[in-house]
Every structure is written in C-alpha cells, then in structure tokens.
Amino acid sequence: MGTTKITRQDFLRDRQGREFSDVLEDPAAPFDTVIEFFNRRDQQHRMEESETLYRKAPLAAVVRDLESLPGIQGFLSTSDAQQRRRFEQSVAILVRMVMERLGWQVVPHTKTIR
C-alpha cells in the first residue's frame, strides 16, 4: 500500500474540485486541515482497508477521526446548512482523489430493475 499527497492546487485542477473553489477560499472552512488529514499515511491505509477488508466506503473508516478534530468539529457545528453541505461534498471529492491516486477506480452504482 502506497501513499499519495494532494495539494490545494491539485484539488483546484480536478474536474470536480474546481467547482468547489469557494470552499477552499472560505476562511471559516478548515479545508487545509482536511487536506493534511487525508495526506497522512495512516488515514490512507485505513481507507484502503475499509474497501478491501470490509467493503465499506473509504470515508467510513476515518469519518469519526476527521469530525473529532477541533477545527472540523467547530466548523460543522457553527456553519449554515448550505456551507456545511458544500464542505462535506468537497471532502468526498478529496477522498475520491486520494483513492484514485492509490490505484482505485470509481465504479458507478446501478439500480437493480425488477
């Protein structure tokens, strides 16, 4: 299992990330803390294990640790619903970027039609 590093510039160059520049530029949003969190080897390792061992979404393995960080916890408890939603969406994009760089591919979900 390798590790990767995502920067603010990488995020802004991403096809989805560029649509969330408002989150990166929001001084109240602790996005640098999020980037630092997901650039850590131990978090990336846990996310990969979540996929391979438990067949759960990568974020499921680390969400409690992420939300327990003081800056994140404070932002989530004080921001408005739209600001919080955009922040959460940007976190999901960052997770996708990390996992793709670790060699994972996004597989779209399809509904079963009866």
Image (cartoon, rainbow, N blue to C red):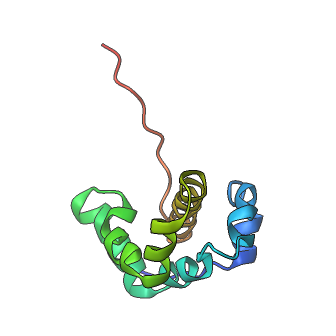
Count of numbered circles in the view: 0
Q: Residue at x 53, y 64 (%)?
A: 91
Q: Residue at x 61, y 81 (%)?
A: 32
> What residue is at 50 percent from the left and 71 percent from the top?
102
Q: Residue furthest top?
A: 114
In which quadrant will I find the N terminus?
bottom left
76 vs 89, left or right, is left
Q: Nearer the viewer, residue 37 or 47?
A: 37
> Residue 109, percent across and down?
43, 37
Residue lying at 47% horizontally and 61% vertically, measured from the top left: 104
- Identify which residue, 79 or 61, lies in the foreground: 79
Location of the C terminus by quadrant is top left
Residue 103, percent across and down?
50, 66
User: Is residue 72 shown above or below 59?
Assistant: below
State whether residue 34 is above or below residue 41: above
Q: Nearer the viewer, residue 93 or 78?
A: 78
Expressed as whole percent of the image width and height from the top left, the position of residue 79 reads 55, 63
